[in-house]
Image (cartoon, rainbow, N blue to C red):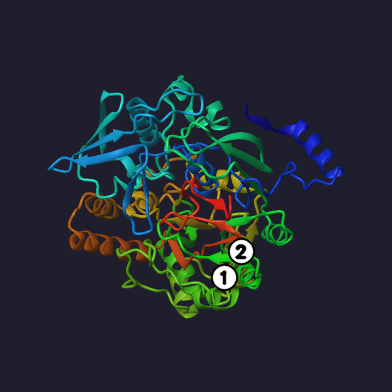
Amino acid sequence: MIRVLTGFWSKVILSALMVLGVSSGLLAVDHTKGTLVLGTEAVLRHFNGAVQSGSATALPSTQIFASPLRFDENWNPQPYLAESWEFSEDGLTLTLKLVQKAIFHDGKPVTSADVAFTIKTIKENHPFQTMLEAVASVDTPDDHTAVIHLSKPHPAILLAMCPGLMPILPKHVYDTGENIKEHPANLKPIGSGPFKLTEFVAGEYFVLEKFDGFFIEGRPLLDKIVVRILPDTNAQILSLENGELDGIPMINDVRAVQRLEKNADLIVTNDGFEGIGAINWLAFNTKKPPLDNVKVRQAIAWAVDRKFIIDKLMLGKVEPSYAPISPGSPLSTTEVEHYDLDLDKANALLDEAGFPKKENGERFALQVDYEPEAEFLQHNVAEYLRSQLKKIGIAVTVRSSADFPAWANRVSNYDFDLTMDTVYNWGDPVIGVGRTYVSTNIRPGIMWSNTQSYANPKVDELLNKAAVEMDPKKRKDLYLEFQKIVVDEVPIFFINVVPYFGVYRKGLENIPTTIWGPLSPLDQVHWAGE
C-alpha cells in the first residue's frame, strides 16, 4: 500500500518526527541492508513520466516504470521490456517483441495493449510533441507483439523508447476516462519497473521498495531507495557530509562540487549525462510587448556579458552555449552570432525599436523569473541581469517563486517577461530541441513546450525536414540553418552548458554511467559486499 501524506496530517507527523530527533521529511532509515538514501532539489508534482518531462519526474519514474528499451554509454539501444525490435525495409514500421514474463506491480501482465495505450497517451499529452509525432498507429497482433506504424521516417524513435521518455503505463489502471494528467494513479503509480512506490510525502520525500516480481531475474539488488527532497543545495551537501544521504545523483553547483571533491569518503563523477544535453538560458515571452520586437530581444542579447557570467558567476567551470543544440551533440554548431558584449549596439537597437531613454534614464521595465531550485545557475544570473540591463535603460525586477510548480505554472501559462530556464536536449533534436521552437507546440499549461510563443514558418519547415532526414550530412545542414535563424531572432539567449555531476558515498557500486546517468533504472546498483 502506498502512503501519500499531504496537508495537515503530514505536518503533524513530520513535527512529531522532529521532536523525536528524526530529520524533517525522512522516516528513520537504516543505511545498510540494501538501502540507498539519495537527495534531490527537484520538487516533483507526480510520478507519471508519460505526461510530464524533467528530471524531477524521471528520477522516480525510471525506477517505477519499465520502458521498451534502455541505452548503454555508447548510445546503443539495449533490450528491456522489448527483447527484440526490427524495422521494415522502408523504415516506416517498427516491430517490438516483448518479454513474456513482465508483470506490473499489481500482478497483471504487461502486454502490447499497454504499449499501444502508452504511446497514444504520450503522443496526446507529453510536452515533447515532436517526439512521437511520426507515429500513425500501433497494431497489437498478439499480447507480446507491438507493431508501430510511422507516417514518415523517424531517426530518433528508438531513443524515444528509453526509460525517461516512454514509461509503459498499465492500461487497466489508466484507461478510465479521467484526465490522465490529473489521474489519481499519478500519485499512486503502478509500473513494471524494478522498484515500487510505497510512501510519498509531497515536497519532503518518497520511498521506493524492491519489486520481487521484476522480470529481470536477480534484480534489483537494492531493497529500498529513499529520496529526500531538499531544495536547498547547502542542505543536501550537509546531509551528505553528515551521513544522512548516500548520494546526490544530479548536482550542478560547481562550488559545491569543488567542496565535495575534497571529501575522501565520496565519489564525484560527471560520467553518464551525455543524453541529457542541458543548456542554461534566458527565455523571452515573444508575444508580450516590448519583447515581441526582435530588436529589443537582440539588444538584450548584446547587453548580457556571457563571458562574465561564465568566468565570475560560474567560476570558469562551465562551457559556453551559443545555439539551440547542446555542444555535446554532433548536430551542434558555433557558426552563429555569439552576441559578445556590445552596449553601444544594444543601445542603438533599442533606439531603432522606438524605445528612447526617458529623463530618468529608463526606457521600460521588465520582470525576470528563475527556476527556484537553480540558485547557482539561474538566481545569480537573474540578479546580475538587474544591474547589467540597467546600463541600457531597462529596469529589471527579479521575481521569485515559492517552488518549482509555482514557477512552472507561471511560465507555461505565459505569465512572464523573461525567465531563466534549464532545458534538456534529450539525446536528439527531434525529442528535446524542436519542442521549444515549432509553432505547433505552443500549448498553454505545458511546461517545456514552446513557452516563448515563438513562431516562424521557416523554422517549422526546417525542423520538420530534419526530423525525417536519414542522411547525417543533410540532416546536419538543416539543423545548422535552423540554429542560425533562431539565434538571429533571439526567442532565447543561450548562456552555458549545464555541468551535471553525481556524488556518492564510496562503497556504492554499479552507479549508472549510461547516456542517461541517474535517469536510468538503478536495478544493478548495490553496496560493496551486498
x, y (%) of residue 226?
64, 44
**Residue named by callout 1:** 389
Who's the residue at 40% across and 74% down the image? 338
Give the CA separation, mark 2 to mark 1. Answer: 7 Å
Q: Which is more N-terminal, label 1 or label 2? A: 1
Who's the residue at 39% across and 44% down the image? 128
Task: Check the image and name the residue furthest to the left.
Answer: 89
Marking on residue 396: 2
x, y (%) of residue 301?
46, 69
Horizontal relation, residue 8 to residue 79: left or right: right
x, y (%) of residue 150?
22, 38
Q: Name the image quarter holding residue 92.
A: top left
User: Is residue 207 shown to the viewer in this render?
Assistant: yes
In the rendered image, the quadrant that contains the N terminus is top right
Label 2 Cα neighbours within 10 Å, binned few <14 / some 14-19 / many ≥20: many
Nearer to us in this view, 340 or 20: 20
Q: Is residue 220 shown above or below 314? A: above
Who's the residue at 66% across and 30% down the image? 3
Q: Is residue 494 shown above or below 459? A: below
